[in-house]
Amino acid sequence: MPRLLLIDDDARLSAMVADYLRNAGFAVELAATLNDGRRRLLIENFDALVLDLMLPDGDGLDLTRELRADARTRRLPLLMLTARGEPLDRIVGLELGADDYLSKPFEPRELLARIKALLRRALPGEPAQEVMRFGRLEIDLGARKARLDAREVDLTAHQFELLRVLAQHAGRVMTRDQIMDTLKGHAQEAFDRSIDVHVSRIRALIEDDPRNPRRVLTVRGVGYLFARRPDEPGQEAREGVDGQA
């Protein structure tokens, strides 16, 4: 039974969500403050975290930053709840390492679907021995790790899945809709830029110069292309392909 931690100071909402998720087969623990959530994360193991952005003793963004800096919780699937509704808040959360976000008010059924999607991405699945190599970058499907110059790249589970999808379609342009369909994630809002934020984070980790990327390229007005031979000169010099979005 997957164990979830919900950190939210809205007691009524937390109780309702916890009951719904428990009926769906999850074990749910509650925390109403950042400090209580930190304490529980230190002494217990959870399969996923649902974290409110605004809490009485601090900002959920601070805890997100801490979790992604800790090797023990770096890959913990994290869904952020926000009542602010501002795109910048969601973008900052994703940049700090949140895997997904959901704006309040929300339908419990949608929350359940998103949590299931995060857990699917985090599962190792069938043992895979294939290691994809693109110049100095290695993507180890079995270990679910990426390495640049033999050093592990600090990707979240969601970011690894996104990188895997792009790499497995190397040399082909993928639209944002195709990426989401391949990831089997939830439907995105029409102007949702979460994929772009995750791509930006991936670029910061695997590109020598994230402002002029050679591995994950933007195709203007279409989507993204993963370069087959990124370490060779001139790979990005093709019509309609930019480094950045």
Image (spheres, grey):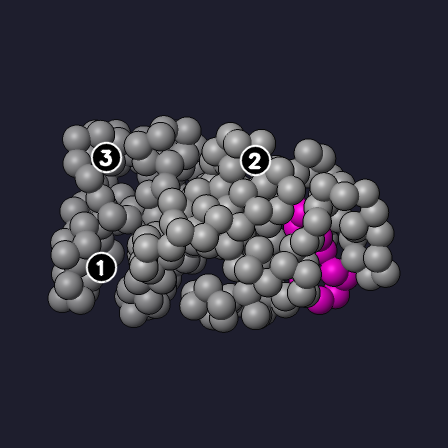
Q: Which residues are magenta?
A: 215-223
Q: Secondary structure at mark 2?
A: strand
Amino acid marked by disc 3: Leu
Marked residue nearer the N-terminal end (2 or 3): 3
Examine the structure image and report whether residue 157 is included in the region drawn in magenta: no
Left or right side of 138 for 214: right
| Residue where numbered disc 2 is placed | 148
Tell me the residue that label 1 is attached to: 17
Taking depth in this image into account, of 87 and 11 the one nearest to the observer is: 87
- Is there a contact, CB below 8 Å, between mark 3 and mark 1? no
Q: What type is the residue that disc 2 sits on?
A: Leu
Q: Earlier in the sequence, mark 3 or mark 1?
A: 1
- Residue 126 vs 90, above or below: the answer is below
Q: Secondary structure at mark 3?
A: helix
Between marks 1 and 2 in the image, the one whose residue lies nearer the viewer: 2
Q: Position of residue 4 (x, y in %)?
A: 22, 50
Mark 3 to mark 1: distance in Å? 20 Å
Which of disc 2 and disc 1 is earlier in sequence?
Answer: 1
Nearer to me, 73 or 133: 133
Residue 65 is at least partly visible in this image: yes
User: Is 15 positioned to the left or the right of 110 in the image?
Assistant: left
Q: Residues within 10 Å of mark 1 (few under 14, many from 20)?
A: some
- Spot occupied by residue 203 in the image (x, y as percentages of width and height): 62, 42
Task: Give the residue at the far front of this rendering.
Answer: 129
Magenta run includes residue 217: yes
